[in-house]
Amino acid sequence: MFEFLFKYRPVVFEHGQFVFASARVIAIGLLVALVIAVPAIATYRRVSAKSTRQDRVVLALLRAAAFALILVCLFRPMMVLSAAVPRQNVLAVLIDDSRSMQIADRGTARGADVAKTFAATGPLMTALGEKFILRLFRFSANADRVTSLTEVTDAAPETRIGPALDRVHDDLTGTPVAGVVLVSDGADNARPAPGAPTLDDQLRALRARGMPVYTVGVGREAFARDIQVSRVEAPKTVLKGSALVVTVIVTQHGFKGSTVPLVVEDSGRVVSTQDVALGADGEMAPIRVHVPAATAGARLLTFKIPVQTGEMVQQNNAQSAVITVLDRRAKILYIEGEARSELKFVRSAVADDPNLQVVTLIRTAENKFLRMSVDDSLELVTGFPKSREELFKYRGIILGSVEASFFTVDQLHMLADFVSERGGGLLALGGRRALAEGGYAGTALADVLPMQLETPRAGESTFVELKVELSPTGARYAATQIAGSEAKSTERYKTLPPLSSVNTIGRAKAGAIVLLSGVPVNGGDRRPVMLWQRYGRGKAIAFPVQDAWLWKMQADVPVGDKAHETLWRQTLRWLVSDVPGQVDILTANEHVLPKEPVTLRAEVRDAIHVKMNDAQVVAHVVAPSGARKDVAMEWTVDRDGEYRASFTPEERGMYAVQVVATSNGKPVAGDTAYLRSDESQAEYFDAEMRAPLLRRIAGETGGRFYTLETAASLPKDVVYTKSGTTEIQRMDLWDMPAIFLVVVLLLGCEWAYRRARGLA
């Protein structure tokens, strides 16, 4: 319809430049128009007859518009644009060769639809071949030249559009290239290495090279019926015996309101099953799953929903995650300014936990301390650590009711660095000498804590009893689960006795998350009871109550109830989870492809966690078969403390990578990470045709977006390009049907107006 009305296709108006045939003709035409217009206007002004002033204005405007349009046509408007010289330019055609092209979301496989549309003897390729020298490529992770579509197998495990376009450009360097036709569903799942060009960088480079990309989208933009396990959110490491809560994100179309089973497997063994009610179409629903962490080592957990009737994609119903269960003893330093019941019951709650060691330093008098659970007679013998090396040996710190003046300024800064630089966990408890009442406002720890510290006014009572409730966000965390499920935990908190606080609690900071909140028993505003925030490399938690032990000893609590013990054990395990050591392996992805080079990165720090650039670092790579390979890691130079190496996994299965650092022949530390080598199913996730990405690729490079249904327009559009060998074409616009129709419409409106007003 556009071409019928305006004579040419939209691409002509997008790429062309509007001009008139002759400036002299324009000048003469304007002069003639003026000569004609003046008497005409004067005539309209003198002749009134039965017409009103409004009638004359309307009729004059309609007549003037028609006259002006005819006058413009006399000036010979035209579009000037460059077009490819026939058979003098190369046109590259890239066909997606990845697994997502096997999806039959339109009744037949996407690859079959492409083969039919771009068949060598079909009308589309014949028309393109008449105007261009065609070069056919298949692409997935890279691009390869092929002679026919029979070489496209739709079997590659991933799609990388940017590198494929770069490869085509390099292959055709030195030849006149009119452009690139990219045929794909747009399911780009490239994972660029740190420092490598991103797709945005590659698109800017293509535009600078003058290589337009004409994208052809394949497949549906939305599936009619499909269930997808989109993502699994789980900690990388947990202590053995911890309550592990994994969030599974499920997306679905066409199964609204259905209930399906979610099955959890640990290395192929079913460990959990629960029914899941699916929400609205297209909605990302988080499902929290409780998984036992009873066995140490690398656990391959798979979360899957059985394939349902009518699903368009069956391979996206499962996701896996590698979680390392550590069987080690994490040391936590607990500092108290006074002997109180809270200390006794915290230690009692974790006394039997083989993975937690709570080293306690209690001030009994001025410069006198009681030490408990220390490793030797010299540990903390002079009180709180005075050096970073001594403090940074711990993985977590608990601050009880101890005032800020107990520490020196340097020690307060050390505590802040313990969280931000060492990556440790800090737990601040309530008490009469804690938080704002302890003078921490304005200190180095004020920024670390997850809430604002508000200094109480003189004489103001800060005592309040709080009925504690589990927040909706807190229900997602394993630390706050004190019963078998989220719902049961929520109800259990409602039955626990109130706790008291003697601290002024300000509002939570912008990045903080409230896990438990409390409502004053005697009325008042709700306030946070447990909250946390990420600070630097570590985390800071606040629990500003002074008698959580009531959840163990209050008369209403049943004998043998484990709520208090469970809360403290899980909170302290969470406090020290994911705390990095001196060697930290920075794995970008735990899943790698067989026979594809893998880049290993590790960050090395000394005993006070300052990045080291002079260490000797070796990665011991153990294959699933037990074969071991040692790979030397080199300092990256551009980043302090970072070392890199690469290896190629030859086997399928779980690889253990142990990185060991030494300095001057003395060991620094080590760390172990696990990588799973297997075929990727990434092509089947979010596998709908990604039209926005394909449009962006076309728009940012000067091309256009099509679908298989509209691809027949390609030969008419691609010819108008500024790339390759081109010639200038001038295309007249004065004889467009739209102009004739507008002139007729204006004159018709004038006549209709006259008839309506009785002036005809």
Image: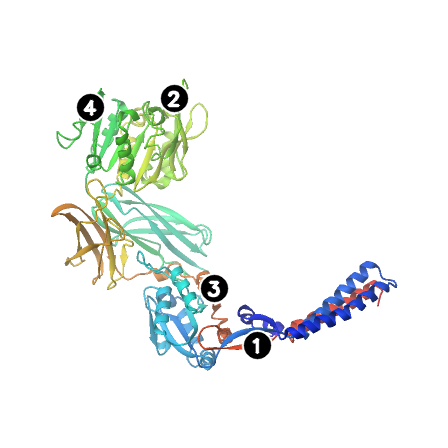
Q: CA distance from mark 1 to mark 2?
A: 86 Å
Of the two numbered discs 1 and 4 on the same chain, state the one appearing first in sequence: 4
> Where is 206 relative to 480, above or below?
below
Local SS, label 2: loop
Q: Upstream in the sequence, badge 3 or badge 2?
A: 2
For the residue marked with disc 4, what is the amino acid? Phe
Residue 544, x across and y down, in percent: 35, 29
Q: Earlier in the sequence, mark 2 or mark 4?
A: 4
Q: Do the residues bearing badges 1 and 4 touch, measured as CB atoms within 8 Å?
A: no
**Disc on res. 369:** 4
Quadrant assignment, res 626? bottom left
Nearer to me, 549 or 3: 3
Give the mark, 1 or 3, whose residue is nearer the N terminus: 3
The picture quadrant where one finds residue 143 is bottom left
Q: Which mark is residue 699?
A: 3
Q: Is residue 482 visible?
A: no
The CA distance from mark 1 to mark 4 is: 94 Å
Please, is residue 513 above or below residue 211 in the view? above
Specify the label residue 730 is tagged with: 1
Tell me the quarter of the image containing the C terminus: bottom right
Q: Tag 2 or tag 1, which sits nearer the N-term?
A: 2
Q: Which residue is mark 2?
A: 463
